[in-house]
Amino acid sequence: MQRRLALIVAGALILAVAELALLVFAARTIGLPLTLLLVLATTVLGGWLVRREGVRAWRALRTAASAGRPVGPEVSDGVIGLASGVLLLVPGFLTDLAGLALRVPVLRRAAGTGVRGLAERRFNPALAGDLFGPRRVRVRRGAPVPADEPPIEGEIVDDD
């Protein structure tokens, strides 16, 4: 746990130094007023996106819950949308680039898949099933099981 915290702090410090260096470079290249205007514009855009994505995610969550569908896809999409807005809200060009990247549909879907995978690993299988519905598994066709191996005994239990 302490190692993870140390890595997070180190990453935040490296990001802050990189953001500051990039801001200084931009100010020298395009001028301080234009650099400040760009930072202010992306901050305002980020604030607007946080509000819009939050309302959108809440409505999608309520709609899915009232329809009896699993709410996990709406939650993960909302998390990605909010993360995009927060990254744009934070001053700096690297975080803005990451926030804008999360607006691209292909990258947004990939990030949503990552959030779903993280949730499925963190939560117990029953909760993950309630959130996202039945898991999709890949079946590989291989050599059939030899007939001389004993079958695996088991029982199917339905919680409903």
Image (spheres, helix red, strand yellow):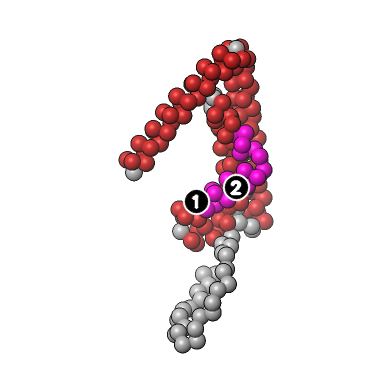
Q: Which mark is residue 118?
A: 1
- 99 or 155, which is in the foreground? 99
* Residue drawn where x is 34% and y is 43% of the image: 1
Q: What residue span does the magenta drawing correspond to?
A: 99-117
Q: Is residue 45 above or below residue 133?
A: above
Residue at the image point whose x is 46% and y is 29% from the top: 15
Quadrant the C terminus occupies: bottom right
| Amino acid beneath label 2 | Ala
Callout count? 2
Residue 9 x/y as whole percent: 39, 33
Quadrant assignment, res 88? top right
Q: Which mark is first along the chain, 1 or 2?
A: 2
Left or right: 68 in relation to 16: right
| Residue situated furthest left in the rendering | 2
Where is 3 relative to 20, above or below? Answer: below
Give the residue pinned by disc 2.
Answer: 110
Measure how far apart labels 2 and 1 are at the Cα level: 12 Å
On screen, residue 154 versus residue 113, left or right, reads: left
Mark 1, residues whose alpha carbon is within 10 Å: few (<14), some, or many (≥20)? few
Q: Is residue 85 visible?
A: no
Residue 115 lies in magenta, yes or no? Answer: yes
